[in-house]
Image: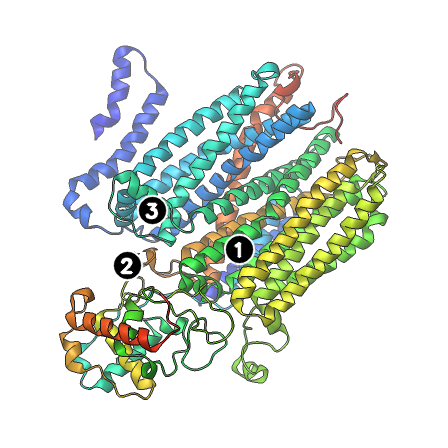
Amino acid sequence: MSEVALLQIIGLCVVGMGIIILLFIKGMFLRVLGFVAMVLGTFSLIALSVPQMASLPPAVETFDLASVKSPEDLASIGQKIFFSKGQCALCHSIGPSESARCPDLNGIGAKLAPGFIYESLTQPQAYIYLDYRHEGLPKEYPARMPHIDKDPIGLTNQEIYSVIAFLQKMSGEPISVKVEDIMNVEGEGDQKNPKVASLGQSSQREQQEARGTIQE
Amino acid sequence: MKSLGCWPQHDSQRTGRWNPSLLGWSAFLALLLFPMMAWAGGATQAMSVEYRDIPGVGSRNVVWVVAQQHLLLAGFVLGVPIFAWVCEIVGWKTKEARYDKLAKEFTKLLTSAYATTALFGGILLFLLIGLYPKLMAYLTDMFFPSFLLYCLLFLLETATLYMYWYGWDYMQGNKKAFHLFLGFLLNVFALGIMIVPNSWATFQASPVVVADGTAWERAWAAMQNPTWWPVNIHRLIANVVLGGFIVGAYAGIRYLLAVSKEEREHYDWMGYVGNFIGVFGMLPLPFAGYWLMREIYQYNQQMGITLMGGFLAWLFILQAMLIGVLFLGANYYFWMGITHRIPGSESQYRKPVMAMLVVLLLCLGVWMTPHSLVASLEEARKMGGTHHPLLGVFGVMSAKMTVSNLMILVTFMSFIMYWRAGKQETAGWAKAAKAIMGALLVLAGIAVVVLGVWGYFVPAIIRINYFSVAQVLIVLFIMITFTPLTALLMKSAKTTTEMVWGKMPIRAGYSLVLNAVMVILLMSLMGYARSSSRVHWHIYGVMRDTSEYAFSPALGYAAAFMSLNTFVFCLLVAFIFWVATLGDKAKANPPHGKPIDVPGHAAPAMAGGSPRVGEKLE
């Protein structure tokens, strides 16, 4: 017997007991208790009739370096991270969507340089692209991009690069992230990584020049 | 260990001052010290322990029950002083003894529940230290200065409560002002006792980056997290609601058990006051809840989505059901009051009551409509998705905000109707005032609906920031303008039908009990929501829950637990109140001779409203 079925039987018994008390017991206090039991049993039964979803903790995902042989492997891992640990799809869509609360990432890998994407993920407040909805009023609230490299999401540099590889592949761009670069990137402490830092700075300037809409 | 437990007794015997309570305290301390000493023995091992479990039951389940009992009792003992004090002030200003007596009866319930609240707080603390040592070490490191502040506030609150309660009869006449000042202090300290621990709990949900500094600076920075004040305000109002409805349920049960006419009259009136306090607090509560949710979204959109659109989405359907039943119960009680306490009013108000009932039921139906329906694959295909083509329209926030505002408006108007029943306005401007109020009410209702419908056609940001806020402000405007206007109208009004107390049917008592159960369930449900919104984190994004209980249980299991907790709480409160009234029964029915004549305000059992000669009830 499943847990839900067992709880339903208990709930029914409690409701039944409440009804019996109300029908046959004269003592007023006991009748009130029977009434309370009936109400609580009914509440439990209703709660048991809605979809039962538990929130399970996600497994701690690790970047399996050994499995990466080609940029496509990297993009494949990035895709998994995009829809799971990275939680990107919680707010972003790939293609038009009414439920998306944040920019549509369709073709983003072709529009933005990898360095700028990296910076957007790790320092989202550095530059705020107010008009990212492309229509209507600028939307600053409630969307607020989290720092992807910090808790609660906490992607490592290798994982972030994999996501960038996925975004490029999904946009039909050649994947510029190289497997050997990934091997050399430290999992933690991205600020100390000269390759990452220089990539971010140069692309920032490029983007600033290229887009008048980017505001500080 | 043995010597520790025996020492006080031995010492007392030696000095000839053997004291059983001292022995009891020693035994209690020894009991507490035993596990501490045992753990101290393996200090190195204890340092590495992250969790301890209670086999068979589960540590989380035990903490869940104890924390829930503590929080519900705490909500009661922090909410009651607010309206007990207000009631005392009303009695002092109007010179009507019944209000003073009612305030004293409220305080008696508070005093009885206070020790039990502290007891559960102590048990909870020991359980948390023992079962979650790593988390508690982190929180202690962050908040230790605030722990000291909390202890100080608790001492001050206890001392003030002792003076407030035991000095009630002594501080009458010229000393009444000082007694009222004590009541004020009681509420100030109670507020402090509530907001300090709130900061610990809200930090777990919305931690902030705490820079280096002194211990006080770090604690203060951590306390000022984004959801602290929204939760403080929400809990403050909710405590008043809980206190009001529990007092109402107490009065309802006493009314059902009453044998004399005086008792029935008194507890009918007390039930009315309890229900009024509950409704009074309930009206602004959704606005406070809206602010809290907004802050949660602003702090972390992901957490907001987990609450409103993730695995907890169905919880809000249950919440709508509970709030809907609560609104119906509270209104039903008002309507019964009009029918049974004001003879002749039934026919006059039948049509408006029916209209209000229809509006409430329609609103409840919309509020309970889920965004995505539970459908089989076949059904979903026919519908073109899980959104029903017609009902799906009601499943979104725009519809729910609209109906919740309308339900608040209806409930407020029920109260206004009750207030005006049995009275005839005599002021020259009464007709114009009533016409303006009627027009404003219709306009407000239309505006709320129009904004709700318009909300479908604008971006979410416009709806959240402007339309929903406008709806709330419209309803608040009605409440703020109608209340003083009605008070002015009633000041010069002529009473056409005297209010008759003690004539309510039995179902009135049950509806008061139902309201209290709904509020307790609501608090339990939303506590589960707040805790579950942290998902697998003890401190969101900072300290991950790595125990075997790092999951949030499904709604059905959680609801069964909430029901159990509610039932246990009801039994606990019934027991506490029963014990509290034992002394009064003894005074009323002494074993030998005549009942003791307890003069004036020293009659707590019947305090507050048994109509006596010369005392006007309404």
Residue in front for this viewpoint, B238 or B60: B238
Residue B303 seen anywhere in this rendered image of the structure? yes
Tell me whether marks 3 and 2 sit on the same chain: yes
The kind of residue tagged 1 is Tyr
Classify the position of the C terminus of chain B by image quarter: top right
Q: Name the image quarter holding residue A207.
A: bottom left
The disc placed on residue B546 is: 2
- The residues tagged by marks 1 and 3 sit, at their Cα atoms, a distance apart of 23 Å
Residue B259 seen anywhere in this rendered image of the structure? no
Circle 1 is placed at which residue position? B290
Q: Are marks 2 and 1 in contact (CB under 8 Å)?
A: no
In this rendering, the label closer to the viewer, 2 or 1: 1
Decide: few, some or many residues near mark 1? Use Cα within 10 Å; few <14, some 14-19, many ≥20. some
Q: Secondary structure at mark 1?
A: helix
Pointer 1 chain: B
- The residues tagged by marks 3 and 2 sit, at their Cα atoms, a distance apart of 23 Å
Residue at x 49% of width, y 28% of height: B185
Circle 3 is placed at which residue position? B222
**Would residue A184 be found to the left or right of residue A98 on screen?**
left
Horizontal and vertical percent for residue B485?
A: 74, 41
The kind of residue tagged 2 is Thr
Q: Name the image quarter holding residue B386.
A: bottom right
Horizontal and vertical percent for residue B202?
A: 39, 49
**Would residue B235 be found to the left or right of residue B277 on screen?**
left
**Would residue A134 be found to the left or right of residue B222 on screen?**
right
